[in-house]
Amino acid sequence: MPALSMVESRGNPYGGPGRHRSMNWKSLARLAYGSRYAKVPSSQRVYVRPGERWAREAQWQWLIRRAPILTLDEYAARTELGAIEEFLSCMMCGESRQQPLFEPAGGNGWRYRVVRCPACGFLYRNPNVRPERLGDLYATGYSGFLTGAYAANRQRRYELVMRGFSPVFDEGKERRLLDFGCGAGLFLELAERRGFDACGVDLSADSVEQAGMRLRRARAFFGAPEDVPEIAAGGFDVITLWSVLAHLPRPLEDFARFRRLLAPGGLLLILTVNAGSLLLKACGPGWNGFTKNHLMFYDSRTVRTLLRRTGFAGVAFAPHYGDSVEAGTTRLRPELAARLRRTVERGDGGNMMRVLAFADDEAIGRWGASLDVHRLLPPGGRA
Ligand SMILES: [Zn+2]
C-alpha cells in the first residue's frame, strides 16, 4: 500500500482510488455548463460539452509531466508483488523505467497498478499477472451470462464493427476465419451466417461447450491454437480478436503467431478498449477500460508498434462513436450527436478501438482501397 500514495496525493488530478479531486471538476463543470448537459449520459458528456476535449487533454499532459519516473528497481522496491504476479518492462519498446499513474479498483476487492512507459506511452498493469497463472483470473461460470439480451447486444456490437470496415466482412464466401478467444461462439454464429468457413479457440471449457450447442457449421475448440491441428495448420484469411487483446500477457508472441497463421492477403480484426480515449483522460482510475482482468491498454500508436514489430504491413482504424449513436437509438439531440462524432474524430477515435491489420501488400491491395490504410512496412518490406 505505501508505494503510490505520493503519486496520488501530489501528482494525480483524479485522486487515487478516492474521488475528492474529481469534485473540483464537477463544480467547475457546473459553473461552465450549468445543467445543460445533465441529461446526457456520463460516458457521452465528455464528448459533447464544448471545450472539454481541450481541457481534458491539458489535464492529461499535466498528469504526465507531474508523475514521477522511476527505474524498475526503484519501482519494484516500493511496490507490493502478489503471488501470481511479476514485474515487467515495456513490451512495446523495451524501456524499463516506470511512470506510475493509476490504481484502479473495483468490486470484490480487486485492485492493480497501471504504469505508463515514459518512452513510448504504453499503459500497462505492473506488476502484471504471470502467464502461467492467468487461469486464476477466470473463475468458473465465466460463460454463464452469455445469453439472452447480453448475447443480442454483443452481436449487435460485432455487426457495427464489421460495418465500419465494409466491404471486408459483408460476405464470407467460404473464406477461412479464426476467432481467437471465441467464448460461447456469439461471433462464430454471425460468421457462419455470413458464409465464412469459421472456427474458434478458447481457454474456457464451459464456453466452448456452449459454442458447440449454438453453432451449425462453425467449430469451437478448447485450448491454444497450437493444440488444435486444424488451427495450427494456419492458412486463415481472417483472424478476429473480440475484446481479447487487453487480456494477452505476451502480445508480441501471440501476434507473431497470428501473423504466421494468416494466409497471403490475410486480415486481423481487433476490438479493444482505447487507452487514447478522452473518457480515460476524464475518468482516470475510474475509466471503464480498467476492468479486473485487463492487463495492457493500447492506443492507436502502441497498437501500430505491436503490429509493425510482428510483421504486419498496414493498419486501418474505424472510429467508435458508441453503440447507441451508431445504431441510431441514442437519445442525444441531433446537434449533440453530431458534436460527439466530431470530438471522436478529432481525438483518438473514441472509447473502443476498432483495428483492421493487413498481413502483407496483397492484403492492402485487395481490401485497402476503400479504407484509410497506414503503412507499417514499406511496400515489399518484411519485419
Ligand atoms: Zn515503451
Image (cartoon, helix red, strand yellow):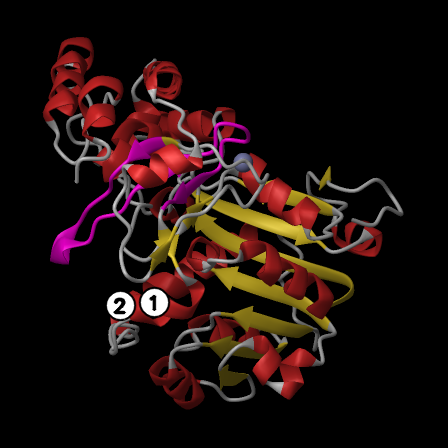
Kindly identify the residue that appears in the image at 11 percent across and 15 percent down: 27
Residue type at mark 1?
Ala
Q: Is residue 197 left or right of residue 130?
A: right
Q: Is mark 2 within 8 Å of ligand 1?
A: no
Whether residue 235 is visible to the viewer of this picture, yes or no, is: yes
How dense is the environment of label 2, judged by Cα within 10 Å: few (below 14), some, or many (20 and up)? few
> Above or below — where is 180 with respect to 346?
below
Q: Read off the magenta span.
A: 100-126
How dense is the environment of label 1, judged by Cα within 10 Å: few (below 14), some, or many (20 and up)? few
Q: Is residue 50 magenta?
A: no
Residue type at mark 2?
Ala
Please report contact status of discs 1 and 2: CB closer than 8 Å, yes or no.
yes
Q: Indicate the secondary structure of the residue bearing disc 2.
A: helix
For mark 1, what is the residue? 152
Q: Is residue 256 left or right of residue 369?
A: left
**Quadrant the N terminus occupies:** top left
> Above or below — where is 270 with respect to 328?
below
Question: Where does residue 105 sit, x and y in percent of width and height?
Answer: 19, 46
Question: Where does residue 315 sit, x and y in percent of width and height?
Answer: 67, 45
Most foreground residue, 60 or 118: 118
For mark 2, what is the residue? 149
> Above or below — where is 255 with respect to 185?
above
Q: Is residue 121 magenta?
A: yes
Ligand 1 occupies quarter: top right
Q: Indicate the secondary structure of the residue bearing disc 1.
A: helix
Q: Is residue 383 left or right of residue 274?
A: right
Most foreground residue, 369 or 312: 312
